[in-house]
Amino acid sequence: MNIFWHGFSCVRIETETRIGPVSLLTDPFDGESGVRFPKNLTPDIVVLSHQDKKRFSMDFENKPFLINDPGEYEVKGVFAFGVPVDHPDRQHPHGVMFRFKIEGMTVGFLGGMDRIPSDKEIALLENIDILLLPVGGNGLLTPQQAMETITRIEPRLVIPLGHYIEGMKNETGHVDAFCQAMGACKRQDVSKLKIQKKDLPADETVITVIEKS
């Protein structure tokens, strides 16, 4: 499995399934953000962390399978389970966080999460090997909230999203603030993460910072 980060909560996961190569993309965004979105992507699956599709850009040459509702899905050998993110003061549409099963690994995607998940939500996510979550604040998880979320979920590998990159128009915290909040942050900086189940850390949580692709 190869994981790329394109900015904000947009991640591309490339995998091989029983039917061939499959590309999954989360939370595509438009160019008004000040950050360049890669052109000519043709994902097989697009996953949105909110049910309001107007928040995202769906300008693709192909027609990917769209997932933005809670529930269980199997698309081209990739399993996805959507968990609703409830807010007492908000009506439908609402946010969604996801668990993916890919190549024998469980990937948690918290996309637009702006608070620490509840015990019920964490229980629905079940065991997570790789956790993708925002850490930059500004309407999303702050470094401190992200740290507490990681402590409660206990993933084996963490990939921080939603932190500052050059050109970004909104005021978002730098990933260094998240690493500082984590204390002993075993940080690995890579342009993409290529990982197999056998490569997952066994006895500790490792933070891998992926540079924007």
Image (tube, helix red, strand yellow):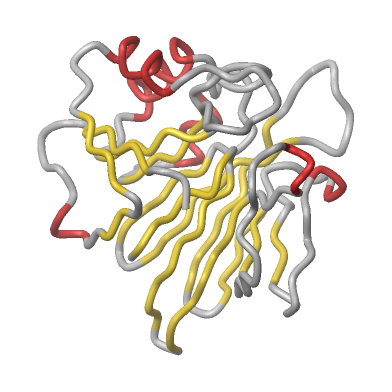
Task: Identify which residue, 142 or 38, lies in the foreground.
Answer: 38
Vertically, is 2 above or below 171?
A: below
Q: Residue at x 79, y 65 (%)?
A: 59
Task: Identify which residue, 52 or 40, lies in the foreground.
Answer: 40
Q: Is residue 49 left or right of residue 165?
A: right
Q: Is residue 125 left or right of residue 72?
A: left
Residue 93 locus on image (x, y percent): 85, 39
Residue 144 locus on image (x, y percent): 44, 10
Q: Residue at x 53, y 21 (%)?
A: 136
Vertically, is 78 above or below 18?
A: above
Residue 104 locus on image (x, y percent): 30, 64
- Which residue is at the far left? 203
Q: Residue at x 52, y 17 (%)?
A: 173
Task: Identify which residue, 173 or 2, lies in the foreground.
Answer: 173
- Which residue is at the far front? 167
Location of the N terminus (image quadrant) = bottom left
Residue 85 appears in which quarter of the rendering?
top right
Residue 14 locus on image (x, y percent): 43, 68
Q: Is residue 127 left or right of residue 77?
A: left
Residue 91 appears in which quarter of the rendering?
top right
Vertically, is 124 above or below 105?
A: above
